[in-house]
Amino acid sequence: MFYRYLLTTISISTIILIVICLIFILMTKFLTPEGLKKLEEELQMRKTEMRQKIAEIIKEAKEQGDLSENAEYSEAKRQQADNERRIIELENEIRTSEVSSFDKESQTVQMGSSVKVKFDGNEQTFAIVGSNEADPLGGKISNESPIGQALMGKSAGDKMKVSTPAGEQEYEILEVK
C-alpha cells in the first residue's frame, strides 16, 4: 500500500515537473536586438522617471489631508501599482526571452529578416519579429503568427499555403533581406 502511494506520488510529481519544464520552454519568447533594447529602455524609464513622478503625486495627495476620501491619492496609488506590475512584467520578459541572432548573409527567412512576398496579386514587405514586437499594421509580423511560421526558414522563390483568418492564401517569397 505504501509503495503504491509512493509510486503515485512520484509519478504525479514527475508529471508536474515535466509540465513546468514544457511551460517554461513554451513561454520563451524570441526578441530581436532592437526589441530587447526597447524593453530595456521602457524598464529603465519606469524604474526612474515614472516612479519619481508617481511618488511626487502621492506626496502632494498626502499633504491634502484625509486619505480615505482623497481621489487623487487613490488614483496615484493605482498608478503606482500599475507601474510596479509593468516593471515586473518587463523584468520577466527580459529574463525569459531569447535574443535572436540575425545572419545577414543568410538567404533564408529568420528573426529580423525583411521579407517581400506576393499574395493575391499584391506585394507586401514584412519584418519578422518576436511576438511582443509585432505590429501587423506597421508591417511587423510575429514569428509565431501563421504567416510568420510559414515564412521561417524559407528562401526567395518558395511558395506556401497559409491558413489565415481570411482563409487559406498562397504566398510566394520574392526577396529576403
Image: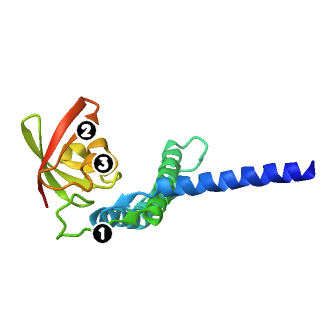
Whether 74 is drawn above or below 45: the answer is above
| Crowd rating for badge 1 (residues with CA inside 10 Å; few <14, some 14–19, many 20+) | few
Foreground disc of the pair 2, 1: 2
Which residue in the protein does label 1 denote?
Answer: 101
Foreground disc of the pair 3, 1: 3
Res. 119 in view: yes
Q: Position of residue 125 (x, y in %)?
A: 13, 49
Marks 3 and 1 close (CB-CB < 8 Å): no
Could you tell whether 85 is left or right of 7 in the image?
left
Q: Position of residue 49 (x, y in %)?
A: 39, 64
Mark 2–mark 3 distance (CA, rounded to whole Å):
9 Å
Kindly indicate the quadrant of the structure image that contains residue 69.
top right
Q: Element type at marker 3?
A: helix
Which residue in the protein does label 3 denote?
Answer: 149
Which of the pair 5/134 is nearer the observer? 5
Which residue: 53% across, 45% down?
74
Label 1 amino acid? Ser
